[in-house]
Image: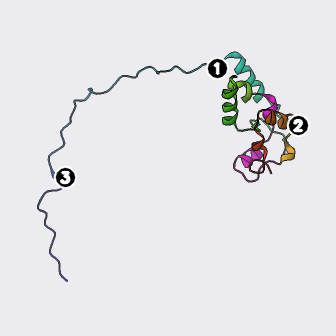
Amino acid sequence: MKRSALQRKTPLKGQQAALKRRTQLGQGVKPLQPRATPRKRESDEARNAREAWHNVPDDAPCVACGKPVRGAPPHHVVPKQVLKHVAEARGIPAWFLLWDERVRVIVCLPCHAAHENASPRLRFSCLSTPNLTSASDLGCERYLGPRYYR
């Protein structure tokens, strides 16, 4: 079947005259406004607790594989978001639970990444007695189950 060339009754939009600007340049640009609520500064007590929590000797052994951690960040036994919610419900500062030494597990970077990616998870036997008691004191026993630790 032979077809004839397409003939348009109206021109394409690109073939029309250039678009006109609705506002002139320089108008309509709003200057930056200060934040409605200023960011909260971390107290010295909270900063010291956080630094102490992260201060792990490089030669400290990983609880999962026994290799030196070499500056890897520790792992929270209970998720940080849960600790924040528990702190809010109890009316205490969040940093008090976040940087508590009893909720940290010292793991090397490969083991920490594997645990966070769920392949494989840390063993339940890697958790110390202070880890288990702090989680139960906070009412967070469900975060110690097989979904989080094998």
Quick one: 90 or 150, which is closer to the camera?
90
x and y, in percent, of residue 57 in the image: 83, 31
- Indicate left or right for 119 with 34 as reference: right
Circle 2 or circle 3, nearest the eye? 2
Please state the extent of the stretch shown in magenta in the rendering: 100-122
First of labels 1, 2 by sequence position: 1
- Judging from the image, what secondary structure is the residue with disc 2 in? helix
- In the structure shown, which secondary structural element does the residue marked by tag 3 occupy? helix
For the residues carrying marks 1 and 2, which lies nearer the camera in this image?
A: 2
Left or right of residue 80, residue 61 in this image: right
Instruction: Give the spatial CA distance, label 2 vs label 3.
Output: 72 Å
Quarter of the image with the N terminus is bottom left
The residue indicated by pointer 1 is: 42
Q: Residue at x 40, y 23 (%)?
A: 32
Label at residue 13: 3
Q: In the rendered structure, which amino acid carries the disc numbered 1?
A: Glu
